Image: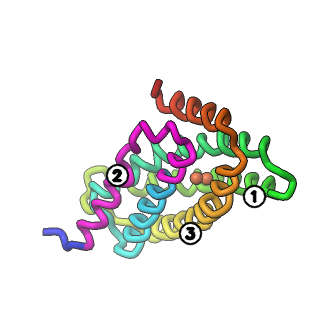
Amino acid sequence: MAAPDARARATAAKDAVKPLPLALLDDPLEYILADHLRQRCVCASLKTFATAKRASRAEADQVIAFLSCELPLHHQDEDLDLFPTLRRRLHPEDDLGAVLARLSEDHKRTELLIHDIIDALAAHPADDPVKVGRHARETMLGYSALEHRHLVIENGIVLVIARRRLTAADLKAMSGAMKARRGVH
Ligand SMILES: [Fe+2]
Ligand SMILES: [Fe+2]
């Protein structure tokens, strides 16, 4: 029987990859914030994998599903909708242009790391547990650290300013684009 902490981790990973309620797409900034919480849960799973040098098949598959399906959509939400809309509304004193450019660069940098992580976890689909080798462990910890810094800036600065600057029409347009991206009408 799984230890309580292992069960709690498995539940957190499972919750992280569960689709968010579609109604939340009506409030796009809240949706993005909720997605960030899922990213934190996935990073916690990756740190656990790296420490234990292995992952259960179920947890590995949940993380693969999130990184390959959900995270690319989130990056598009930001790169194609949130950041460009916010750029148009920024006041000079917000001084956020370089920060937004850096965040989009982070998305590109993390794509390479995410590819490596997915490859490592998916390499032997019949293995349970999945062995996590040294290169994969370093990549998981490197990605988690980068993502943590990224989320601190997005939650603490970008979303705070977006709440002040975006208009009701901006939010409605963002909501429509994010729904279309997910095939929701
Ligand atoms: Fe984000
Ligand atoms: Fe981001």
Q: To which residue does mark 2 refer?
A: 62
- Find the distance from the CA under tag 1 to the CA under tag 3: 18 Å
Q: Who comes first in sequence, dot 1 or dot 3?
A: 1
* For residue 10, above or below residue 177: below
Gap between marks 1 and 2, in whole Å? Answer: 31 Å
| CB contact under 8 Å: marks 1 and 2 | no
Q: How many neighbours does mark 1 have within 10 angstroms: few (below 14), some (14-19), or many (20 or more)? A: some
Q: Is disc 2 surrounded by few (<14), some (14 to 19) or many (20+) residues within 10 Å?
A: many
Please report whichever mark, 1 or 2, sits nearer to the chain's N-terminal start: 2
Quick one: label 3, few (<14), some, or many (20+) residues within 10 Å?
A: few
Q: Which residue is mark 3?
A: 145
Amino acid of disc 2: Gln
Residue 49, image quadrant: bottom left
Image: magenta residue range: 5-34
Picture coordinates of residue 18, whole percent (x, y): 35, 47
Instruction: Tell me the kind of residue under disc 3.
Output: Ala
Image: 53 above or below 119: below
- The label on residue 139 is none
Is residue 160 one of those drawn in magenta? no
Q: Label 3 CB, ligand 2: below 8 Å?
A: no
The residue beneath circle 1 is 99
Residue 21 inside the magenta-drawn segment = yes
Identify the residue at the far right of this view.
92
Look at 83% across and 51% down and name the residue there: 91
Residue occupying the point 34% across, 74% down:
52
Spot occupied by residue 108 in the image (x, y as percentages of width and height): 65, 50
Of circles 1 and 3, the one toward us is: 1
> Which one is in front, 126 or 3?
3
